[in-house]
Structures are given as structure tokens and as C-alpha cells.
Amino acid sequence: MKPLLLVLVLANALPAVAQTQVRQAHVYRCGPEGRDLRDSPCPGDNSGSSSIAVDEPGAADTRAARDRHLSEAKQAAAVAAARRASDAEARHQRSQHVGLQTLPPPTPESGPQVTYLKPPKVAKPKKPSAAASHSDR
């Protein structure tokens, strides 16, 4: 678990280290009142361009975010472990209260009581009489 956590922390920290560099972007303000920002010159307009500094988090901010992430991950793992433990305890208590309750052992003087069910007797159909079969013709 610890090596996996370490790998995840390092994987999250590497992009943060790469983003701590201060960068500037060259933009052109176009349109009415300069509200349309573009990375290429405005078409048909020779308005001025300006540089905008991109706000990058500093090393201290990155470190604080990483520490906060680690503490939240530890807290989440502790909460998950506590939840698993309480669920296991609840299952154990439910099985004692509602679970399979065994019958008391049979006493030696009473043998097993077996009842056999017989199928009901079906009356056989009567044969038609010879006189009835000739009278139908």
C-alpha cells in the first residue's frame, strides 16, 4: 500500500513541479473595447499587443497542496478502514440475533418421526356395456 501511495504522490507532484515556471503569453486585444483576446494579430486592425503573465503556483503552494492531499488520503483511508470494521461488526451482530438458530438436539427416547404420503386411489373407469355400444348405431 505504501509503495503505491508513494508512486501516486510522485506522479501528482511531477506535473506540479513542471508548472512552477513563470510563463508569459503574447496576446492581441481586438474588437470593441479590446474584449476579444487572440494569440494572432487582429484582422484589419493595427491595435497594440500586450503581454499577460500567467499565474503559476509557487513551490510553497505546490508543497502545501501535496501535503494537504497526503493528509486527506490518510484520513480517507482511516475512514474507510473504520467503515469496514463497523460493517463487519454489524454483520456479526446481525448473524447472532437473526441468523440461523439451531434446533435443540433430539432426545434419545423420541425416534425420528417419518410420515409417508400415499397417492390417492383413483377409481378405474367402467367399461361400457355391450348393449349401450350397439344401441348407438
Image (spheres, rainbow, N blue to C red):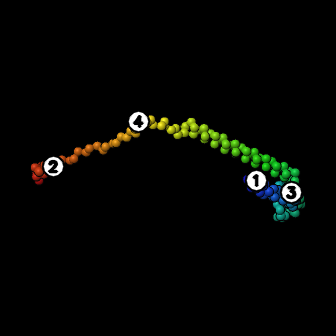
Mark sitting on residue 20: 3
Q: Is residue 43 above or below residue 2?
A: below
User: Do labels 4 and 3 touch, CB within 8 Å?
Assistant: no
On the image, numbered disc 4 is attached to which residue? 110
Q: Position of residue 118 (x, y in %)?
A: 31, 43
Amino acid type of the residue tagged 2 in the rendering: Pro
**Mark 4: secondary structure:** loop
Mark 1 or 3: in front is 1
Amino acid type of the residue tagged 1 in the rendering: Lys
Distance from label 3 to label 2 (Cα)?
107 Å
- List the single residue furthest toward the front: 108
User: Do labels 1 and 3 touch, CB within 8 Å?
Assistant: no
Earlier in the chain: of badge 1 and badge 3, it is 1
Distance from label 2 to label 1 (Cα)?
92 Å
Amino acid type of the residue tagged 3 in the rendering: Thr
Mark 4 or 3: in front is 4
Amino acid type of the residue tagged 4 in the rendering: Ser
